[in-house]
Amino acid sequence: MADKLAIVTGASTGIGFELATLAAKEGYDLIVVADEALIDAAAADFKQFGTEVRSVQADLATIDGVDTLLAAAGSRAIDLLAANAGIGKGGPFLEQEVASWRHSIDTNVTGTVYLLQKVLRNMVARGQGKVLVTGSIVGYIPGSFNAVYNATKAFIDNFTEALRNELKDVEGVMLTTLMPGATDTEFFARADMLDTQVGQDDGKADPAKVARDGWDALMAGKGHLVSGLSNKLQVAASGIVPQSVLAQMHRGMAERGSGEE
């Protein structure tokens, strides 16, 4: 058993998988969670680095799911949390089932906020801990044809900035927001966006690099990090370009069929 414990959510694939790999390499025992059975196979990969790994299959859109995750830690203190779980659903909002868009909001917002409150309370009480939250640059962009997802990331980007300010005088506790752009993960397949321009783009970021950027920012004590130069430029432009123009630009990337010749 290592002397430090990390929890990584959404760890079965993509950025979360890479963050869990980094934590295992750095000697953290791991609790990894996702809402699919694939999390068990991912956990087997992490064990190669010699630390204890426990996998939890839970729906982090629910309070019970978050409580199940936290219960897995038992009496151990959580030294690092990577709150990475997030889901989206592309296509016209008016065509989406209530259960679909609500699950996105409950996973990306409600579950994340509850998890952060529970973990950070204990970290602040003992004056030690690190938290990395995966936001997104799309939080700065009105997300036509992915409207709910972008709005949830706007919440996370804004919420963590406010929370970081509330905690600025707390010694020993670090909260970092990682804001990537389009990344080469399962997100676009799961969001039914493979026929879109962004879904077919070969230039999406490497999740291993995005995870490393976020990890390094957390360890360096940075409040937030936009991963990738082009993404930094997009964030800068979002403060200048009218919101209606940004929405139209996003439509060109995310509308169904936009990836077809």
Image (cartoon, rainbow, N blue to C red):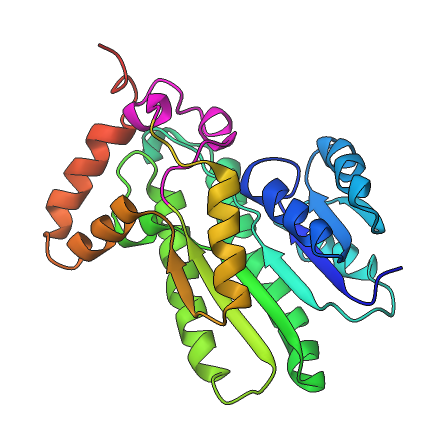
Residue 81, given in percent of the width and then of the height, sits at 64, 61
Total marks in image: 0
- Give the quadrant of residue 162: bottom left
- Give the quadrant of residue 26: bottom right
- Give the quadrant of residue 58: top right
Q: Residue at x 35, y 21 (%)?
A: 200
Residue 207, given in percent of the width and then of the height, sits at 50, 39
**Vertical arrangement, residue 210 with respect to residue 109, above or below:** above
Q: Residue at x 54, y 51 (%)?
A: 106
Magenta stretch: give its range. Answer: 181-202
Would you say residue 125 sits in the magenta stretch?
no
Q: Nearer the viewer, residue 36 or 14?
A: 14
Would residue 131 be visible to someone looking at this image? yes
Residue 179, given in percent of the width and then of the height, sits at 40, 53
Would residue 87 be visible to someone looking at this image? no
Q: Residue at x 33, y 50 (%)?
A: 137
Magenta span: chief secondary structure = loop
**Vertical arrangement, residue 4 with respect to residue 187, above or below:** below
Would you say residue 182 sits in the magenta stretch?
yes
Q: Where's the C terminus, which quadrant?
A: top left
Q: Where's the N terminus, which quadrant?
A: bottom right
12 relative position to 132: left or right: right
